[in-house]
Image (cartoon, grey):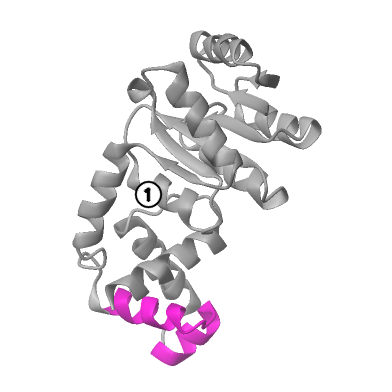
Amino acid sequence: MRVVVADDSVLLREGLVRLLTEVDCEVVAAVEDAPSFLRAAAEQRPDVAIVDVRMPPNMTDDGLRAAVEARTSRPELGILMLSAYVELSYADVLLSDGRGGVGYLLKDRITSLETLVDALRTITAGGTVLDPEVVAQLLVARRADPLSALSAREKEVLALMAEGRSNAAIAERLVITGGAVEKHISNIFAKINLPDVGSDNRRVLAVLAWLRAR
């Protein structure tokens, strides 16, 4: 199993390299920031990557953004995201394409090397691995109405997005400006907690939230 490790913590990064080497995984690169991860993923063509959600250069969701970009280039690449805490919007982004081969684990819940290796094997086989706490919070979130915070106008805009209409078509239908449509869509993304990992991707996720609530 060829693995890339991407984490800005040198202790965690080097620790993962040593542990994985002990179980005969081939760590082809160990990097500390998102741009370096993208280069390593392209050049080394690993089977799976272990990526921290928050990494340099911005220390926000750079790791997640890079993972989504890497999977766009190589859909067969397995991705195991590591995080210090549960971010449901990040889990949604990771799972949104429905292809499998992904995982989301909390760092402090990985209590053994066996747990980590089992997760990597599942992911490389096309399966999905989620921390139990992530699953529990996703279930709670699914029971709630994700659209309850939207205004009536924002719901109208989202309904038209679900019909596949462009921003210009939405503006014409609602007799508002294109700028107003963009502002409504930005508010929708913020209110249903969709991180910016590409506007098209967020648009799809917003529509999926609308369809789930019907």
Q: Position of residue 69 (x, y in %)?
A: 64, 46
Q: Amino acid at mark 1?
A: Ser
Q: Residue 24 placed where, x, y %?
A: 65, 16
Q: Is residue 200 above or below residue 13?
A: below
Of residue 206 and residue 191, the one placed in the foreground of this image is 206
Residue under circle 1? 89
Residues drawn in magenta: 153-174
Residue drawn 20% across the image and 53% down it? 140
Q: Nearer the viewer, residue 17 or 169?
A: 17
Helix, strand or loop at label 1? It is helix
Magenta-colored segment: predominant secondary structure:
helix
35 in relation to 193, above or below: above
What percent of the width, then of the height, locates residue 58? 52, 31
The relative height of residue 10 versus residue 170 in the rendered view (above or below) is above
Residue 66 visible (yes or no): no
Residue 81: percent from the left, percent from the top?
49, 35
Which image quadrant: the C terminus?
bottom left
Asked whether 81 falls inside the magenta stretch, the response is no
Q: Residues within 10 Å of mark 1 (few under 14, many from 20)?
A: some
Please give left or right for residue 123 compared with residue 27 in the image.
left
The quarter of the picture where the N terminus appears is top right
From this view, report whether residue 137 is shown above or below residue 108: below
161 falls in the magenta region: yes
